[in-house]
Amino acid sequence: MQLGMIGLGRMGANMVRRLIRGGHHCVVFDRDPEAVHRLAAEGAVGAGSLDDLISRLSPPRALWMMVPAGDATEATVDALVQRLSPEDIVIDGGNSYFKDDVRRGKALTARGLHYVDVGTSGGTWGLDRGYCLMIGGPESAVTHLDPIFRTLAPGLGIVGRTKGRERMEGTAEEGYLYCGPAGAGHFVKMIHNGIEYGLMQAYAEGFDIFRHANAKHLPNDMRYDLNLADIAEVWRRGSVVGSWLLDLTAAALAENPDLSNFTGSVQDSGEGRWTVMAAIEEGVPAEVLSVSLYTRFRSRQDHTFAEKILSAMRYQFGGHVERPAG
């Protein structure tokens, strides 16, 4: 299938590579010509502008954006709307606010276009592991794009089937899911990221307790010099708290047990805030998710080992580099 990709950063470029491996025809554009040239050398068709990109696609066109949420996405959508034809599909695979998707979906529908929002999880590892996709938008457009989603998603892989799933239909166990109309995909991804904050915070606090288990104010016979890298590793083997986040924590601690390459200044990308806002609007208690967000705010003023664990996990799964505090 033919697809245009706009934005060739860490995830966008690897998604194109995975699609090319799957036999799809990808036309790519980025503001950085070098990023376009690199993928053109790997089998994609490079475009020098949005107009060039669109001209190289056959109607009905499908254009996938992997650009930062907010102004960059808004500007790209506006530019595409002026250039596309009825029945063309605009796909936002970034981390847009779901309310923005609802608004954009209505605006594009009025012009005869289709707007699809895809919450995309997988980070820098998605090229080989595949991407978990949470999809919203017109069902007909989503069905049309199924070959793209199926290639990007992990598939069954090595994950065991959930008992009872064999009696159920759908694509969830393939790693992609149609969640509902415009905004539904990013809404599900927003809560996914809010939960991610809470999970990461739990690991971070636990390892911080380990880190201080030999504190001088503790009784001599209750002080422990613990090997955090080994604890993370043993928990990967049969423990009920095993997870990919723990795998990444174990890798970070094996590389640098003191995490001295991190300051502990932890950023938030927006979805955690939106999750808490949604909880408030719905009247749903979300104590853990709220506190994990506030902890990130505090980390930019006063750092603990827990924040270094958080920074290490963010770097491991997404290549996120710490910003200066303040």
Image (cartoon, grey):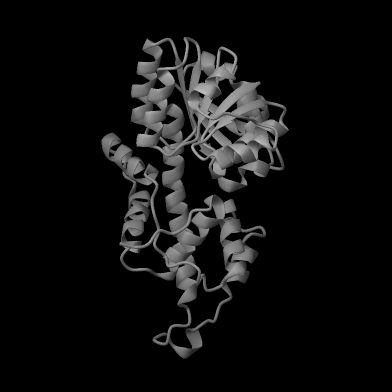
Question: Which image quarter holds the N terminus?
Answer: top right
State which quadrant residue 74 falls in. Answer: top left
Depth order, front residue of 143/166? 143
Q: Is residue 57 visible?
A: yes
Instruction: Point out residue 144 in the picture as x, y percentages from the top left corner.
Output: 59, 16
Depth order, front residue of 238/91? 91
Instruction: Point out residue 137 in the picture as x, y percentages from the top left corner.
Output: 46, 21
State which quadrant residue 302 falls in. Answer: bottom left
What residue sits 41% from the left and 45% below the top? 194
Q: Is residue 169 visible?
A: no
Give above or below for 23 relative to 247.
Answer: above
Question: Which image quarter holds the C terminus?
Answer: bottom left
* Image-based side of 120 in relation to 171, left or right: left
Instruction: Point out residue 228 in the picture as x, y percentages from the top left corner.
Output: 56, 71
Instruction: Point out residue 28 in the picture as x, y percentages from the top left corner.
Output: 58, 30
State which quadrant residue 274 falls in. Answer: top left
What residue sits 71% from the left and 39% below the top? 157
Depth order, front residue of 29/142? 29
Give above or below for 279 relative to 220.
Answer: above
What residue sits 47% from the left and 55% below the top? 200
What residue sits 43% from the left and 51% below the top? 197
Depth order, front residue of 214/303? 303
Give the mark count: 0
